[in-house]
Image (cartoon, rainbow, N blue to C red):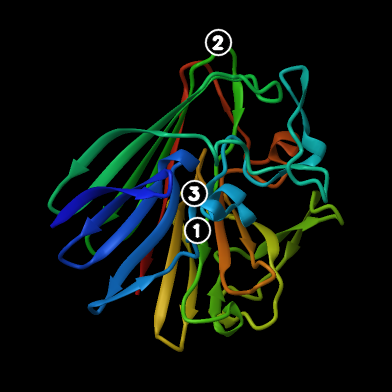
Amino acid sequence: MFKIVKEKFGELTKIKIENSDTREYISIIPEFGGNVNEIALAKEGKIYSILNGYETPAEIIKNDYFKSAKLIPFPNRIEDGKYSFNGKDYQLPINKPDENHAIHGFVWNKKLTLQKKEIRDKYTSVQFEYIYNGSLPGYPFKTRLRIIYFLISEKGFKCSTEIKNIDRCKIPVGDGWHPYFKTSGKVDELMLKIPAKYKTDVDSRMIPTGKRLLYNDYIKLVKIGDTKFDTGFPIMQNGGSVTTEIYDPKVDLKIKIWQETGKWKYNYLQIYIPPSRKSIAIEPMTCKINGFNNKEGLIVLQPNESFKASYGVNIE
């Protein structure tokens, strides 16, 4: 039996979707871009909480490492915060000062409105909406964002995102998600499988050089060890979905993060391990690092046109 519960999270709100039969749940914080702060899924009757989310409201306000942030309207870095589109130059706010880049969009701390709830026998979903009026000079394009979160019996978590151009001109759009996954300890002991055979070559400021390098170290499950990741991967499959796998042999738990691929889908992947090495970020993205400039994977929406795609998580 599914239910949707509204709870207080300090002065913020937590929307919790629960399956009382399996004890599975997800929690969302609408005031911070619809942040998915918890995913707890069941395997053989045992519940595994697999996200390294925010434990207090103060932590989410501080926003270390963009944990579980929605990355709209651009995921990853924009070099020097500058880009040109449709014959005009734009300057985004610099929020990665050590590299002098704009990073991860600006929806992550915006308040989303709960629009719709749905409870069925096999799943429950909640839909959030955010209307952006074009107020930021570096992105003066009006959009409507709708995000639907699902908790599905025996299939885990799913997110479906729709971005609609509600302006009079064409607009550039990108989307991504920045979840950090954890299991029983440091990620060094985990095994990883990546659905890509190439990685994006970057310069000293983490901006793509234009080269694609062969990288097949993790085409099957391999121990992470002391490998460092802040790495982008192009997904070569054109259609269907691909899956990144994390396996913890200590507890025999496999986390599977899937993303749709194809036209205007999640055709890029970023993997990042923070200095603590207590979690690993597996980030589906629609465009390449610096996508507003190199145009690789960039979605251009005409007036009234929409982008829609999904990703999700389950365990085995």
Instruction: Using the numbered discs, state the Cα–Cα distance from disc 1 to disc 2 in whole angstroms.
Output: 38 Å
Q: Position of residue 249 (x, y in %)?
A: 46, 87
Q: Nearer the viewer, mark 1 or mark 2?
A: 1
Instruction: Using the numbered discs, state the Cα–Cα distance from disc 3 to disc 1 in whole angstroms.
Output: 29 Å
Q: Are marks 2 and 3 in contact (CB under 8 Å)?
A: no
Closer to the camera in the image, 84 or 99: 99
Question: From this viewpoint, which residue is outermost toward the right?
Answer: 204
Q: Of the residues shown, which amino acid type is indicated by label 3?
A: Thr
Q: Is residue 40 above or below residue 176?
A: below
> Which residue is disc 1 drawn over?
54
Residue 141 seen by the camera: yes
Mark 2 surroundings: few (<14), some (14-19) or many (≥20) residues within 10 A: few
Question: From this viewpoint, which residue is outermost toward the bottom?
Answer: 250
- At horizontal 71% and vertical 18% (from top left) the residue drawn is 86
Q: Of the residues shown, which amino acid type is indicated by label 2?
A: Arg
Q: Position of residue 68 (x, y in %)?
A: 51, 53
Tally the marks. Answer: 3
> Which residue is disc 2 drawn over?
168
Of the two numbered discs 3 and 1 on the same chain, state the one appearing first in sequence.
Answer: 1
Q: Of the residues shown, which amino acid type is indicated by label 1?
A: Tyr
Q: State the mark number for residue 82.
A: none
Indicate left or right for 196 with 20 as reference.
right
Q: Position of residue 308 (x, y in %)?
A: 43, 36
Mark 3 surroundings: few (<14), some (14-19) or many (≥20) residues within 10 A: many
> Which residue is disc 3 drawn over?
261
